Image: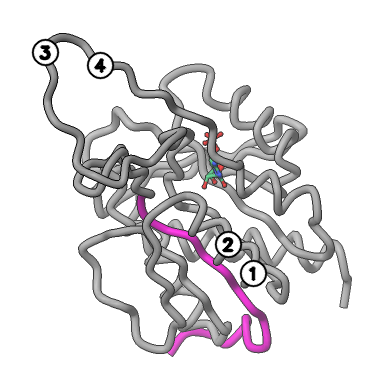
Amino acid sequence: QAIQDMRGLRVVVSAGPTREYLDPVRFISNPSSGKMGFAVAQEARDRGAQVTLVTGPVNLADPAGVRVVRIESALQLRDEVVGAAEWADIVVMTAAVADYRAAELATEKQAKVAGDVTVHLTPNPDILAELGRNKGERVLVGFAMETHAGVERAAGKAQRKNADFILLNYPTREGTAFGGDDNEVTLVRADGSHEDWPRMSKREVARKLLDAALQVKQKAAPG
Ligand code: C5P
């Protein structure tokens, strides 16, 4: 049994992709598997935390002992995460939130037309940034996937979104990030300081992530 060092703490985790419907049968999404977020939820549960997992559509069963909320769109994710975060001590945003949704949602299936079509997209709210604007005592952790200038860009995101740290991962490394069971990440703080972690299982990344979140908490409120 894991050490119960998160007993009494409330943790909210977002996981998986969002789906942004264009019409009743078509959507924009991404290949997020949800594995990273589920690993964080399970690790926090095993350490005694009370966990809410808000997840987009993924092929993973509800973990026992975790409150699981299934959503599809970024707007639904935002409602559930912001609601649950009100009482949370730690919020971990692993969800791969779509940046845009259809400006108008067609209520009927759109028929094929000859030639090109244009889809009007409108930006989704940035949930992590919204939590950062009303941060309170909460520890906020984000993820970022970058193909270039990763540390710099992730530090900029941590700063703009007021997150305590961001775990940067790389879409191009075999067997990691999207869909993989392993991950290779760099912890990046807003001031640009960072730590490279070696490749390890997502469960081990979850363990180290929660260790780092607890450290932030202890610094904020010693003893
Ligand atoms: O800006 P970018 O999408 O790279 O930031 C990634 C981080 O921000 C992730 O933690 C993701 O869950 C979160 N995010 C969010 N709302 C969005 C987009 C990203 O909370 N609309």
Q: How is the image coloured?
A: one colour
SS majority, magenta: loop
Q: What residue appears at the point 72 percent right and 71 percent down from the top-left corner?
A: 86
Cα separation between marks 3 and 4: 9 Å
Position of 160 relative to 143 (above/below): above
Q: Is residue 150 magenta?
A: no
Mark 3 = which residue? 114
Point out residue 83 in the picture as x, y percentages from the top left corner: 64, 69
> Under tag 2, what secondary structure?
helix
Circle 2: residue type: Asp
State how far apart marks 1 and 2 are (Cα). 6 Å
Picture disc at residue 79: 2
Is mark 4 in CB contact (under 8 Å) with mark 2?
no
Q: Position of residue 32 (x, y in %)?
A: 31, 47
Which is more foreground, mark 3 or mark 2?
Answer: 3
Judging by the rendered image, the residue that carries numbered circle 1 is 83
Kind of residue indicated by mark 4: Val
